[in-house]
Image (cartoon, rainbow, N blue to C red):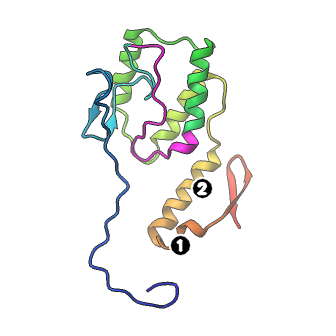
Amino acid sequence: MLDDNDVIQIDAVIYCTGFRYDFSFLPDGLLEVRQNKVVCNLYKYILPPQYSTIFFMGIMRLYILFFPYGDHEALFIKAMLEGSVCIPTYNERITVIDEDSKRPWLSNSHWEWDKELASIAGNFESFLPVLKSIRDHVVAVKAKDFARFRSVNFKITGPDSFEIV
């Protein structure tokens, strides 16, 4: 039923939020893409191990919203370019990439990734715990009332608290 109470017959709903990477314009082996959707051979999902001056920002991983993390990725890259963060050696980057490849990119792992970036870069604070609480609330509301979950507004009342307004 539509907002004006009209009813329409629907044969199928296609939910399309996916994407496919195609980096054919880059040298072979620079980026490793698994199943056309996960780039997996970048240090902290940003820096290829074989280079120290090329960065990939905004490469989506499962369950990560780009815009909030984009700022933090940019600050992480800025710290490396300014030299306030030592870029690890090739072998160190390979070790971290191998460790990160075992990271399950499920509902909460990106919060830990953001804390790691903040800790390494030292030029920004990771997201406040209240943002995770809000996200968790939105996910729960979305599961119960998909049609209306975006209409909920929040007021942050502290680093760990919020209220619905």
The residue that label 1 is drawn on is: 148
Q: Position of residue 160 (x, y in %)?
A: 68, 49
The residue most toward the right is 157
- For residue 158, above or below residue 111: below
- For residue 66, above or below residue 55: below
Label 2 is placed on what type of residue? Ile
Q: Position of residue 94 (x, y in %)?
A: 36, 16
The quadrant in which residue 90 appears is top left
Q: Position of residue 92 (x, y in %)?
A: 41, 12
**Quadrant occupied by the C terminus:** bottom right
Residue 131 relative to residue 101: left or right: right
The quadrant in which residue 46 appears is top left
Give the label on residue 78, or none: none
Nearer the N terminus, badge 1 or badge 2? 2
Q: Main secondary structure of the magenta part?
A: loop
Of circles 1 and 2, the one toward us is 1
Q: Position of residue 20 (x, y in %)?
A: 31, 44
Dot 2 surroundings within 10 Å: few (below 14), some, or many (20 or more)?
many
From which residue to which does the magenta span run? 51-69
Out of 56 and 160, give the one closest to the viewer.
Answer: 56
- For residue 165, above or below residue 87: below
Label 1: state its secondary structure: loop
Label 2: state its secondary structure: helix
The residue that label 2 is drawn on is: 134
Label 1 is placed on what type of residue? Arg
Q: Residue at x 53, y 28 (%)?
A: 116
Residue 54 among those drawn in magenta: yes
Dot 1 surroundings within 10 Å: few (below 14), some, or many (20 or more)?
few
